[in-house]
Image (tube, rainbow, N blue to C red):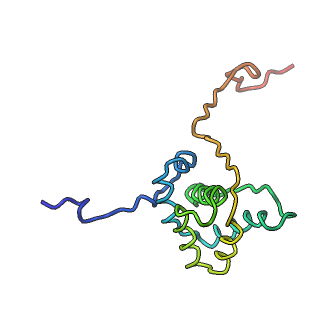
Amino acid sequence: MTKISDVVKLKSGYANFVELKSAFEATQENADRMAMYRPTKAHRVAFERICRGLYQPNDKKFYLLSGSYGTGKSHLCLMTANVLSRSSGTPEIAGFYENYVSLDSEKAKLLKNIRKDGQYLVAICNYHSLKIRATNTSVPLPLPLTAKKP
């Protein structure tokens, strides 16, 4: 009997979410995600603005990336971390540049050329491991529902 897995082949680069730190550190998962990533126009604009700081010294050096759940913020951050931490000739990110060329060949060429040599230190915060605890030291709980009259 034929199994579904024999008929249907899924590529591991697609996912509905990215746990940034573990995806960046897992060599095969990271390479798969890089090869499968298809940046939307909004992602390309954001990515190009971030990378502008590499070749325009007076450009902004801090960007806040925000958006609704599921819009690809973590995927964009993973791609940015890979591009900044590796030279453009690295085989692990060849698929990323190939996909970019199919969408915007001029920008892809520029981005690839500015990342030929060197690498940047990429620090990824693992927000999933933070534990937030409520404390009653500053405000005693429960609060009264009505204010007391003086």
Residue 5, by quadrant, is bottom left
Instruction: Give the left or right position of residue 11, taking residue 123 as reference.
Output: left
Q: Which residue of the protein is positioned furthest toward the left in this rendering?
A: 1
x 58%, y 73%: residue? 100
Instruction: Give the left or right position of residue 1, taking residue 25 as reference.
Output: left
Q: Is residue 140 above or below residue 28?
A: above
In percent of width and height, residue 36 lies at 48, 65
x 68%, y 21%: residue? 141
In percent of width and height, residue 135 lies at 68, 22
Return the residue nearer the eye: 98 or 89: 89
Residue 120, by quadrant, is bottom right
In percent of width and height, residue 127 lies at 62, 40
Q: Is residue 95 above or below residue 5?
A: below
Query: How many numbered discs, if any?
Result: 0
Q: Is residue 47 above or below residue 23?
A: below
Instruction: Give the left or right position of residue 133, taking residue 27 as reference.
Output: right
In percent of width and height, residue 131 lies at 61, 31
Q: Quadrant of the N terminus?
A: bottom left
